[in-house]
Image (cartoon, helix red, strand yellow):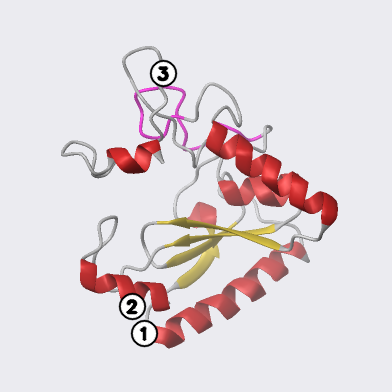
């Protein structure tokens, strides 16, 4: 929430991190680089430099936002099956699935599960506004480690998808107000 609130300042409209005081004059950890799995954390497309927009943090799940989400998923899985989890980002009209950190492909039949469910979502979303959403392996957008979908898949066995929000009216990180309803319908 602190990072989001910062986006409403004159200097922070495209801020992408939380507002952790890194102790060196810089602020923030990229929460999309701070998840596990630990074996891949901060290995690709992530930075150990606290001033970087892709700073992965001082350790895996160091940030309360990511740590709390991991604990919530573990708690839910103790009492009931959890089949899928989603992460919302902007932008690009993309539906991403693991792996994000590597061009290595998931083993079969798991890869097929992600592809089939991803394609079904792609078709359904595109039917709403005649859009051009695509379901792809996350690394095909760009490689990075510490992302939510790799974490939920490897640590919890949950099908994780990232929705890279609609670019229906040509906007991207800052959409015009008239894009809100069509995008939310998708």
Rendered view: 162 above or below 118: above
Residue 132 appears left or right of 118: left
Q: Position of residue 47 (x, y in %)?
A: 45, 28
Asked if disc 3 and disc 2 are in contact, CB closer than 8 Å, the reply is: no
Label 2 crowd (10 A; few <14 / some 14-19 / many >=20): few
Reading the image, the residue beneath label 2 is 182
Say whether residue 111 is left or right of residue 122: right
Q: Which mark is residue 129?
A: 1
Q: Is residue 135 above or below residue 5?
A: below
Q: Nearer the viewer, residue 108 or 22?
A: 22
Disc on res. 22: 3
Find out whether residue 51 is within the magenta segment.
yes
Task: For the residues labelled 2 and 1, say whether their Cβ atoms are less than 8 Å apart.
Answer: yes
| Outermost right residue | 79
Along the polypeptide, which appears first: circle 3 or circle 2?
Answer: 3
Is most of the magenta stretch helix, strand or loop?
loop
Identify the residue at image location x=20%, y=39%.
Answer: 9
Magenta residue span: 40-55
Task: Identify the secondary structure beneath mark 2.
Answer: helix
> Can residue 169 be seen?
no
Q: Residue 177's mark?
A: none
Q: How many marks?
A: 3
The location of residue 150, given as percent across then percent down, is 63, 48
Look at 39% across and 63% down and name the residue there: 165
Q: Which quadrant: the N terminus?
A: top left
In the shown orientation, is residue 3 left or right of residue 113? left
Which tag, 1 or 3, sits closer to the chain's start? Answer: 3
């Amino acid at each position: 929430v602190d990072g989001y609130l910062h986006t409403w300042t004159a200097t922070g409209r495209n801020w992408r991190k939380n507002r952790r005081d890194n102790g060196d004059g810089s602020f923030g950890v990229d929460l999309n680089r701070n998840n596990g799995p630990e074996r891949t954390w901060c290995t690709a497309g992530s930075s150990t430099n606290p001033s970087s927009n892709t700073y992965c943090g001082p350790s895996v799940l160091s940030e309360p936002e990511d740590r709390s989400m991991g604990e919530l998923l573990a708690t839910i899985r103790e009492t009931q099956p959890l089949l899928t989890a989603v992460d919302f980002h902007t932008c690009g009209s993309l539906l991403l699935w693991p792996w994000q950190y590597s061009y290595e492909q998931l083993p079969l039949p798991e890869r097929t599960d992600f592809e089939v469910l991803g394609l079904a979502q792609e078709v359904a979303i595109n039917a709403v506004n005649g859009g051009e959403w695509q379901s792809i392996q996350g690394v095909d957008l760009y490689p990075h480690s510490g992302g939510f979908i790799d974490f939920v898949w490897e640590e919890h066995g949950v099908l994780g998808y990232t929705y890279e929000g609609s670019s229906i009216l040509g906007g991207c990180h800052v959409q015009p107000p008239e894009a809100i309803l069509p995008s939310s319908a998708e």
